[in-house]
Image (cartoon, rainbow, N blue to C red):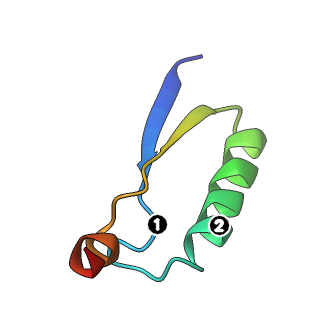
Amino acid sequence: MSKHRIAVIAGDGIGQEVMPEGLRVLEAAATRFNIDLQFDHFDFSSCDYFER
């Protein structure tokens, strides 16, 4: 089984409250279909950029 790395940048194009639910769906699908996912979280979204 290959590992799929996914960059997670909450608040970049969608609301920050949406990302946890999206990750929950991806984890459920990965379990169901035996897919190995690795999430790499980054704290630099466009909303963070404009606040600085």
Q: Which mark is residue 35?
A: none
Is residue 48 depicted above or below 31 in this figure?
Answer: below
Residue depicted at x 32% and y 78%: 47
**Which residue is nearer to you in this view: 29 or 23?**
23
The answer to whether residue 14 is left or right of residue 13 is: right
Image quadrant assignment for residue 31: top right
Between marks 1 and 2, how big is the CA–CA gap?
8 Å
The secondary structure type at the circle numbered 1 is: loop
Q: Pointer 2: residues within 10 angstroms few (<14), some, or many (20+)?
A: few
**Quadrant in which the N terminus is drawn:** top right
Amino acid type, mark 1: Ala
The secondary structure type at the circle numbered 2 is: helix
Q: Which mark is residue 10?
A: 1
Q: Which mark is residue 20?
A: 2
Amino acid type, mark 2: Pro
The answer to whether residue 39 is left or right of residue 6 is: right
Task: Name the residue furthest front.
Answer: 52
Q: Residue 15: percent from the left, percent from the top?
A: 47, 83
Residue depicted at x 48% and y 31%: 4
**Quadrant in which the C terminus is drawn:** bottom left
**Which residue is nearer to you in this view: 46 or 33?**
46
Is residue 3 depicted above or below 21 in this figure?
Answer: above
- Whether pointer 1 and pointer 2 mark residues with C-beta atoms closer than 8 Å, the reply is yes
Image quadrant assignment for residue 48: bottom left
Q: Residue 51: percent from the left, percent from the top?
A: 29, 80
Residue depicted at x 63% and y 54%: 26
Residue depicted at x 75% and y 53%: 28
